[in-house]
Amino acid sequence: MAVRSALMNVMAGAALKAARGLIRDFGEVEQLQVSIKGPGDFVSSADLKAEKILKTELAKARPGFGFVLEEGGISEGSDKSHRWIVDPLDGTTNFLHGIPHWAISIALERDGEIIAGLVYEPVRDEAFWAEKGIGAYLNDRRLRVSARRQMGEALIGTGMPFRDKGDHQRYLKTLAPVMSATSGVRRQGSAALDLAYVAAGRLDGFWEFGLQVWDIAAGILLVREAGGYVTDIAGGHTMLTSGDVLAANDHLHLPLGRLLKQTLNPGSVT
């Protein structure tokens, strides 16, 4: 059985406390779907309440640490080496529509490096967590990325822009060849959970462009501690600044990356 450190217990405790309110609010969404106003404002309020709880609980346990918050922005702490990176509700659109696929994501950064991460999915009570050098776990079970070697057998996750967000043509350009080369592409609406699913072997790979640091910080560590590889699309390590992410098991990371790079920059890959 996995033994969580004091640090991970702090993160898990904060997530559980915030999750109680989110679960309660999620139960109200179905009723609000039929209202004239709609549930949008309600969900924004749920998001903010969860973030406030997370910040309060984490600050109580580690008072000097700084924060990077989806809603609250960046706040410096007296400890300049450590900061929490928090997304109180990843998968807001799913939450808004009553789809039970959303999560709380918490990561801890030390001197620019992610050293701990937790992605908690309250509806299924699944806590994906990892600490640097310790491994990745789902509740008490050790995680490993999948062992699939062939692109034709792989199930790949992605995210796509909506309305006027992001570069739609760039996504469409990459989607077609990945669809043709694999056994399927899934767009599930939560990058944090997509990365957790790569760590758990449920997805064989994942790519997306233009994500925020709070979407991916915990998930990056999960994949790496589960034996997978995470880079930006070019194969570099700018994920936390560029928001472009490519994650996969050790067999599929290179071929998936090659396919994406060839699609985006024909002639650049030989």
Image (spheres, rainbow, N blue to C red):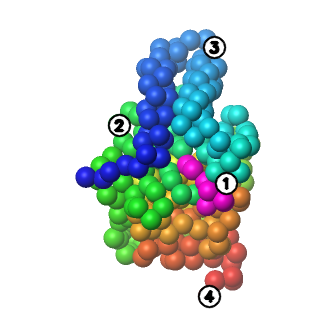
Residue wearing tag 2: 124
Query: Where are the magenta residues, as a range?
Result: 107-113
Residue wearing tag 1: 81
Toward the viewer: 67 or 162?
67
Q: Characterize the local packing of mark 1: few (<14), some (14-19) or many (20 or more) Cα atoms within 10 angstroms.
A: some
Residue 96: % across, % down: 54, 28
Secondary structure at numbered mark 4? loop
Toward the viewer: 193 or 114?
114
Q: Earlier in the sequence, mark 3 or mark 1?
A: 3
Amino acid under disc 2: Arg
Q: Residue at x 52, y 18 (%)?
A: 33
Secondary structure at numbered mark 3? loop
Residue 80: % across, % down: 71, 51
Amino acid under disc 4: Thr
Q: Residue at x 48, y 41 (%)?
A: 11
The correct choice, above or below, for 34 with respect to 246 in the image is above
Q: CA distance from mark 3 to mark 1?
A: 44 Å
Q: CA distance from mark 3 to mark 2?
A: 29 Å
Residue wearing tag 3: 37
Residue 267: % across, % down: 69, 83
Q: CA distance from mark 2 to mark 4?
A: 44 Å
Residue wearing tag 4: 270
- Magenta-colored stretch includes residue 109: yes
Residue 165: % across, % down: 72, 45
**Quadrant showing the C terminus:** bottom right
Q: Earlier in the sequence, mark 4 or mark 3?
A: 3
Q: CA distance from mark 2 to mark 1?
A: 34 Å
Q: Earlier in the sequence, mark 2 or mark 4?
A: 2
